[in-house]
Image: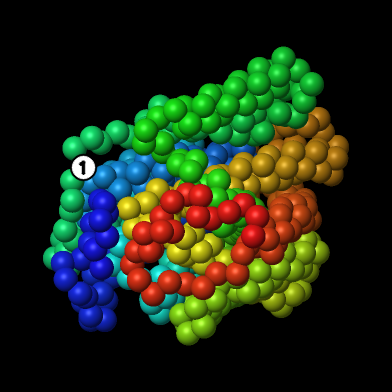
Amino acid sequence: MKTEGTTAEAPTGAMGHRQVLESLSGLLLALLVAMISSTVVSTALPLIIGSLNGSQTQYTWVVTATLLAATATTPIWGKLADLFNKKTLVQVAIVLFVIGSMISGFSQNTGQLIAARAFQGIGVGGLQALVQVVIAAIIPPRERGRYNGYLGAVMAVATVGGPLLGGLIVDVPWLGWRWCFFVGVPIAVLAFIVLQRTLKLETVRRDDVQVDYLGAGLIAAGVSVLLIWVSFVGNSFDWLSWQTAAMVAGGVVLLAVAVLVERKVREPVVPLHIITQRTPALAIIASLAVGMAMFGGAVFLGQYFQVGRGYSPTEAGLLTIPLMAGVLVSSTVTGRLISRSGSIKPYIVAGTITLVIGFLGLGTVDHASPLWLVGIAMAIVGIGVGMTMQNLVLAVQNTVPLRDLGSASASVTFFRSLGGTIGVSVLGAVLANRVTADLSTALHVPAGQSTGSVSALNLKALPPEIQTVVHTVYGDATAHIFLISAAVGVVGVIAALLLKPLTLRTTLDVETKTEEPASDPVAG
């Protein structure tokens, strides 16, 4: 269906189910490699940081650096997708990802690894945003739920296979942890080739292209300053100090200037006319909360099983299967139910509530909790994630015209990633402070000197008696961050409840009369 004024790509003629699957194959491979980049490292990270003699704060920043870079670049990728060829952009993102992966694999210390992971995050941000944008450009919203099952399968392979693969890699002596970064390279190259052969999109070029690099830079700078403050406050300097005042004030000012820039520029990186509508605004709030709870909580599960419970990386990967299985089952079943009914709000509400219940369950665990109890709680979290993550994007895509799909989809992904970045950083800081204090108390030494010059995460280098203390402290402290995740998830529940009932449209584009921003009233 062609609409006057549409500037985005459209598929060359009507695409049947087989043609869509052929095009999806390359997109799903690209999504797989982006997701594996995080999950394959999740179980290996305690050993990686231990081998490099890094700290708990550096452990957090290896994850945060990727999330932050992906968050900062996601809206830029989304805007570029509204202006340039989507297929080419996906391939560029793949190339950047491959370069970042290679640099990460050759890192010699935690500082180099954090920087390399940040570069890798630029490619990850592109893949996260662009895969959903292209899918939205070739499949109508009502039919998209039918294909969400394939997305769910890819998520399951990445989330279940990634930790297992990472655990096996670091447990095999002749491979080593560096292959956790190298392993994604051949998959990325394959995705590039498949996309080149299968994805066919026509492009309508716009001559007056403007990308808001200033706005994106200000947003990234403001968020970075605040996250750096969260990571070091209470440790390197006090809560009430000139450092706190300078960093908090600086971060707030940068974000305020970013909002002013977004209001003035013709092509804002975060389009205020879209995100201030009721449905997108509530979906973004829910995505922010769900992202913070999900990323922030789940990223420390591998550490809980290894450092808190003493399992090997491979065993830790196996123990996280209930979480991933919950994502697979719920995303697949929910996608089909949504396509059949056309109704989406009930599933989002149920998903956010389920997520909170799961995190409350994880908030009861300690270093001696029965594994079956931990597994049930993880499965419930996974079910909640599978019911919410993609469907919040779908809810926003259903309300905007085809020409704004890139910006709208990327905006939701941006705030979800932002929530994840904040969640990992904040919860990591909470865990680091708690562990430092508890280790100092347990070992009767001053804070920061509990394990001497050896990282507490480098368990093999510690005496057996200190290893036991570290297991207990980490196992008991992790529950606190899951309780915080549950509290944050409540915000997502409230936002989901306030969503208007949605019926998914059956066309690629909205009717002309609904393309105006004012058509989505704040009260309804």
Q: Residue at x 71, y 45 (%)?
A: 431
Report which quarter residue 75 is drawn in. Answer: top left
| Residue linked to disc 1 | 206
**In the image, residue 372 above or below residue 267:** below
For this orientation, the residue located farthest to the front is 513
Q: Residue at x 65, y 55 (%)?
A: 523
**In the image, residue 138 above or below residue 328:** above
Q: Is residue 322 left or right of residue 188?
A: right
Q: Is residue 251 left or right of residue 131?
A: right
- Residue 331 horizontal/vertical position (percent): 51, 75
Q: Secondary structure at mark 1?
A: loop
Query: Is residue 115 among what the camera can see?
Result: no
Report which quarter residue 290 is drawn in. Answer: bottom right
Amino acid at the residue labelled 1: Arg
Q: Is residue 172 left or right of residue 521?
A: left
- Residue 128 horizontal/vertical position (percent): 40, 55
